[in-house]
Image (cartoon, rainbow, N blue to C red):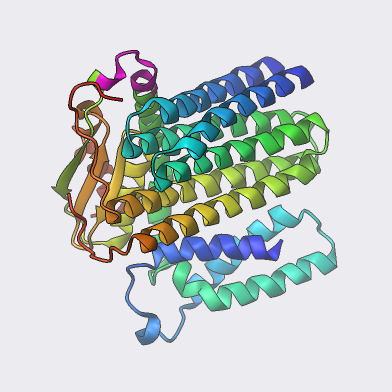
Amino acid sequence: MDIVVTIILIGGLFFFAGGAIGIIRLPEFYCRLHAAGQLDTMGVLWTMAALALYVLDDFSLGAILTSLKIILIVFFLFITSPTATHAIVDAGVRAGLRPWRKRGAEE
Amino acid sequence: MDSIFFYSALFFSILMLLSLYRAVFGPTVLDRLVGVNAIGSKTTVLLILIGLMYHRVEMFVDIALAYATLNFLAVLAASRYFQKRKGLYDEAPTE
Amino acid sequence: MPDQSRGNLNSEGQILAKDSPSPSNQKRKSLTSFILTFLASFVIWLILSGKFDLFHISLGIISCLIVAYTSADLLLPQQKLGHLIKVWLRFIRYLPWLLYQIFIANLHVMYLVLHPRMNQLIAPGIIRFKSKFSDEMSLFIFANSITLTPGTITVYVTVDGNYAVHAIDRKSGEPLPGEMEQRVANIMGE
């Protein structure tokens, strides 16, 4: 059980690391949103699955309730993350930020 | 198992420092907002990890849920606010 | 505790009800959506509170009744119960495919981000297309599915189905109004 939890947790950490590196490396605001919004959501799904499995290891009512709450957090994030991403994109579009075009390799 | 949780929490802190770079030095306001959002979603997982380390996860999971809600509301409010400050109200987005 | 469940339902309801017709001509609230809203919020209450004695359950029933009375017409549009159940079952069957797509696209974006010559690989741009949906619910599900898939973000949607999507490179933006639109159309039974 511990090995499964560790593998899933490391998978989630991999996605989170990709998100953080993407936020630093990508050239422009719209592209950074791709890394920030979606890779983080996937990482949350994996790490939360691992933690819910670990909590469920000793089987009792409290453990079931706790892992249900963790699943509720994931569900909530899957609803709110597209909304938050869209809110930021909308703010960017209305503020008049042009999307970055490829022009050499600046930045 | 505790040491695995400890090292992944440490890894999370390093990732949060990387995101903090974008939140501090971002060229525009919205870049900072992206950094803050990324830090928030990492904090949600980090809170549960801390709860598992201290064997009080049934308490920390409530805090994590409230934090996720607050993070979402903060990002929504901040993005609406900064879009208003620009003073561009035309509905049709340009390009 | 009650604040959290109420906030959850309210934020969800406002997203859904953004484009729905004004509730003034629907003054008589349908009993079905009232009961379904009550049950959903009561299940969330039970999970969040975790205490099953008489006092806490009666508190939950009272606050869930208030929430269901005020926001029953926000969470669920007015529909027949059988149709609603069919839509939910088809939506649940849609979810594994969506998760698989999200996973594939995640790996692609990870490859882009970690590639050393990233600046040559990415080609961001905005794609426009017109979908065939007229129903608000399927527009909403389709837009959220696009945004959840990495590499593509919905910039705006209009009521008559015009989408603008920001794609990070050509490969993730190319297959867009294709299979996903067909699957979402299958959900709503169009």
Asked if residue A54 is positioned above or below residue C183 in the image, the reply reads above
Asked if residue A77 is positioned above or below residue C123 in the image, the reply reads below
Q: Which residues are magenta?
A: C110-119
- The chief SS type of the magenta part is helix
Say which quadrant the C terminus of chain A sits in.
top left
The one nearer the camera, B65 or C118, is C118
Q: Tell me if residue C89 can be seen.
A: no
Q: How many marks?
A: 0
Horizontal and vertical percent for residue A14? 52, 21
Say which quadrant the N terminus of chain A sits in.
top right
Residue C113: within the magenta? yes
Judge left or right: residue A55 versus residue A37.
Answer: right
Judge left or right: residue C160 versus residue C65.
Answer: left
Task: Residue at 84%, 67% (x, y): give it.
Answer: C54
Task: Residue at 58%, 31% (x, y): give it.
Answer: B16
Horizontal and vertical percent for residue B47? 70, 38
Residue C95: which quarter of the image?
top left
Asked if residue C49 is positioned above or below residue A47 in the image, the reply reads below
The one nearer the camera, C49 or B69, is B69
Horizontal and vertical percent for residue A93? 28, 52
Task: Residue at 53%, 52% (x, y): give it.
Answer: B72
Horizontal and vertical percent for residue B28? 39, 44
Task: Residue at 49%, 34% (x, y): give it.
Answer: A40
